[in-house]
Image (cartoon, rainbow, N blue to C red):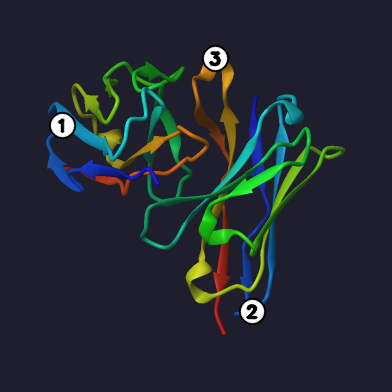
Amino acid sequence: DIQLTQSPSFLSASVGDRVTITCRANQDISSYLAWYQQKPGKAPKLLIYAASTLQSGVPSRFSGSGSGTEFTLTVSSLQPEDFATYYCQQLNHYTWTFGQGTKVEIK
Amino acid sequence: QVQLVQSGAEAKKPGASVKVSCQASGYNFIAYYMHWVRQAPGQGLEWVGWINPRTGDTGSAQKFQGRVTMTRDTSINTAYIELSSLRSDDTAIYYCARFESKWELFCFDYWGQGSLVTVSS
């Protein structure tokens, strides 16, 4: 089974900070990776797909990179509304597993 | 606009079954696979399974095989998930999510609002 490990699991940052979350797969998943944002009490929201393609309507301060087994989600300048939990998801080989999540707290 | 509207909260006893619905609108229902994802209280996202609304074909994560049934009614653009032999650790919010696969740019692009299933004696 393909496993995804996100790091860190929790981070605290200030408004305006550059924030990077890493997602590592235990086998090659090419670019079949998506990132989601989830706020408390809400459904997940798609941010990025195919590792680096920004979903329509998502602010350009969000970006994704990587391929193979290592991926990153970067928020270039953290805003108060970015307080949320972020999940990566792999969509390769007819499996659709998620990382364990990264909770981002605004300092 | 694309919308996925799910059924309301359910409270069930251990050993019972539960059926959650997801009604789609704003797109061609049979053209997109529908997936189901669940989230236990305070926990992360767990993929459950999928259905091809065009054919009715389904697939699920190994841990749910034998306990989960996914169906659809194309006349009302609705997908269903039924989970049987419920246990307390099935308590979770169940989400439906549309699977986009155009040009192999795979993702879950639209999600339902979630349906809380509580299993307790």
Looking at the rendered structure, the secondary structure element under dot 2 is: loop
The amino acid type of the residue labelled 1 equals: Val
Image x and y of residue B13, in percent:
62, 80
Mark 1: few, some, or many residues within 10 Å (few <14, many ≥20)?
some
**In which quadrant of the rendered view does residue A29 lie?**
top left
Q: Are marks 2 and 3 on the same chain?
A: yes
Instruction: Give how far apart the Cα atoms at labels 2 and 3 are.
Output: 42 Å
Location of the C terminus of chain B by quadrant is: bottom right
Residue denoted by label 3: B103
- As drawn, the label of residue B21 is none
Q: Is residue B93 visible?
A: no
Extreme residue toward the bottom, this view:
B121
Which residue is at a point 73% across and 41% down the rendered structure image?
Answer: B57
Q: Nearer the viewer, mark 2 or mark 3?
A: 3
The amino acid at mark 2 is Gly
Q: Is residue B103 above or below residue A94?
A: above
Question: Three-letter amino acid code at disc 3?
Answer: Trp
Closer to the eye: label 1 or 3: 3
Q: Which residue is mark 1?
A: A15
Residue A5: horizontal and vertical position, in percent?
26, 44
Residues under numbered marks 1 and 2 in contact, where contact means CB atoms less than 8 Å apart: no
Q: Give the percent coordinates (x, y) of residue A89.
A: 39, 37
**Could you say which is closer to the camera, residue B67 or residue B38?**
B67
Question: In whole angstroms, how far apart are the C-alphas of marks 1 and 2?
Answer: 48 Å
- Which label lies toward us, 1 or 2? 2
Question: Are the residues under badges 1 and 3 in a single subunit?
Answer: no
- A55 vs A4, nearest the viewer: A4
Q: In screen coordinates, is B112 left or right of A26?
A: right
> Which chain letter matches label 1?
A
Picture quarter containing residue B78? top right
Label 2 belongs to which residue? Answer: B15
